[in-house]
Image (cartoon, helix red, strand yellow):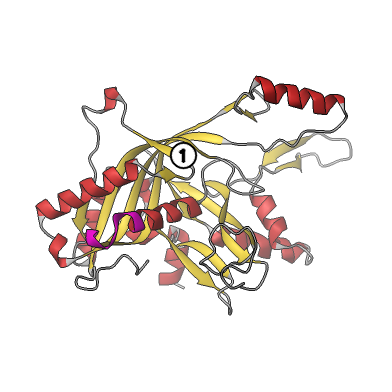
């Protein structure tokens, strides 16, 4: 949670849930890391949360702590039947002439691939409100302010679009409600909130799958690394299984390894490659007032889960955290715990 937007005279201290449903995003970034493509990384949504809080300013009386993402529509800008390629923007006539000239000279042109995707999302924010924002009229004014501010911002590199004319009649409205008291009441409130996000799928973290697969692979091959386990989880594995007659030359059957749900490889943050340089000491840095550090991408596993299968708010929300002795790991964290792990924790 950023503290720069908090009003000293009225520090937000009342937890609440902010729902921004059915947001249409055009041309969001579909290449969020050097090794994955598809849905934007969670760093883009946590960055949006920070930028939104800063743009609202201190007088808004709201602080953002975490964000949950539910995807309702995904339309990658690709073409091709068997081999998918990104539909890149057509170059101008002058650019085409320059490319043709480079090809004739034997110099390959440098082309930076841009992947784009159209999205329909619902965002759930865990926020803190000031005491003067607890009235119904004040909350509704704050919701309208947040929605209007978001409409003029970028989300994961894409443009937030207005609702389609056909959908404006029954368009879902943003809501802001104080967090209920008591576990039972909070559970009812969360289930009602998730019903509003149907149909759709929420992205949650499955770091446990990566640890389990690495342990299983190291039991057979001690030299196996976390990268081997991540690549093994990121693909469909087909294995030849001998038939009932296991004699030489007998036919075998091909089987596909089962998956524990709709799992996907995702980037989850950054790890430091260098020490922290003082502000302004690195040439060509975009921000000369903030300390600078070179980083590389962190990868893990995620899972798409229907919102009605989530049990509590922590299963949905993502938040930023630093790890390591020198705080040299910047991660997007999610506390989702599948039912099997929850049962083991309660009944070891």
Q: Residue at x 27, y 53 (%)?
A: 18
What secondary structure is found at the residue carrying circle 1?
strand
**Residue 57: in magenta span:** yes
Horizontal arrangement in the rendering, residue 345 relative to residue 231 (left or right)? left
Is residue 197 visible to us here?
Answer: no
Tell me, yes or no, if residue 68 can be seen here. yes
**Quarter in which the N terminus is drawn:** bottom left
As drawn, which residue projects farthest toward the bottom?
A: 325
Relative vertical location of residue 4 with respect to residue 325 in this rendering, above or below: above
Pointer 1: what residue? 158
Q: Is residue 172 above or below residue 62?
A: above
Q: Position of residue 345 (x, y in %)?
A: 44, 70
Q: Position of residue 165 (x, y in %)?
A: 28, 23
Kindly identify the residue that appears in the image at 87 percent across and 28 percent down: 105
Q: Position of residue 342 (x, y in %)?
A: 43, 64
- The quadrant holding residue 285 is bottom right
Residue 47, percent from left and from top: 45, 55
On the picture, is 299 further left or further right than 13? right
What span is colored magenta in the figure?
A: 54-60
């Amino acid at each position: 949670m950023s503290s720069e937007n908090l009003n000293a005279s009225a520090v937000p201290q009342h937890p609440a849930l902010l729902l921004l449903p059915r947001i249409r995003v055009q041309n969001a970034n579909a290449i969020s890391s050097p090794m994955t493509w598809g849905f934007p990384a969670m760093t883009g949504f946590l960055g949006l949360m920070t930028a939104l809080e800063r743009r609202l300013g201190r007088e808004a009386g709201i602080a953002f702590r975490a964000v949950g993402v539910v995807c309702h529509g995904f339309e990658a800008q690709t073409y091709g039947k068997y081999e998918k390629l990104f539909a890149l923007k057509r170059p101008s006539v002058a650019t085409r002439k320059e490319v043709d000239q480079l090809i004739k000279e034997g110099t390959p042109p440098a082309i930076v691939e841009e992947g784009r995707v159209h999205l329909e999302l619902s965002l759930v924010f865990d926020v803190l409100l000031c005491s003067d924002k607890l009235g119904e009229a004040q909350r509704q004014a704050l919701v309208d302010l947040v929605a209007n501010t978001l409409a003029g911002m970028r989300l994961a590199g894409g443009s937030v679009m207005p609702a389609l004319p056909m959908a404006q009649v029954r368009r879902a409205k943003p809501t802001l409600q104080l967090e209920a008291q008591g576990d039972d009441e909070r559970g009812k409130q969360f289930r009602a909130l998730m019903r509003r996000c149907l149909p759709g799928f929420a992205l949650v973290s499955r770091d446990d799958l990566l640890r389990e697969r690495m342990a299983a692979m190291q039991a057979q091959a001690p030299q196996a690394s976390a990268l081997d386990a991540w690549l093994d989880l990121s693909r469909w594995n087909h294995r030849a299984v001998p038939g009932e007659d296991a004699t030489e030359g007998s036919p075998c059957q091909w089987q596909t390894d089962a998956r524990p749900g709709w799992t996907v490889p995702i980037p989850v943050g950054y790890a430091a490659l260098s020490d922290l340089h003082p502000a302004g000491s690195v040439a060509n840095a975009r921000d000369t007032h903030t300390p600078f550090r070179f980083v590389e991408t962190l990868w893990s596993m995620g899972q798409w889960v229907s919102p009605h299968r989530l049990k509590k708010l922590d299963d949905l929300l993502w938040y930023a955290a630093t790890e390591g002795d020198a705080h040299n790991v910047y991660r997007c964290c999610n506390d989702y715990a599948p039912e099997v792990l929850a049962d083991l924790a309660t009944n070891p």
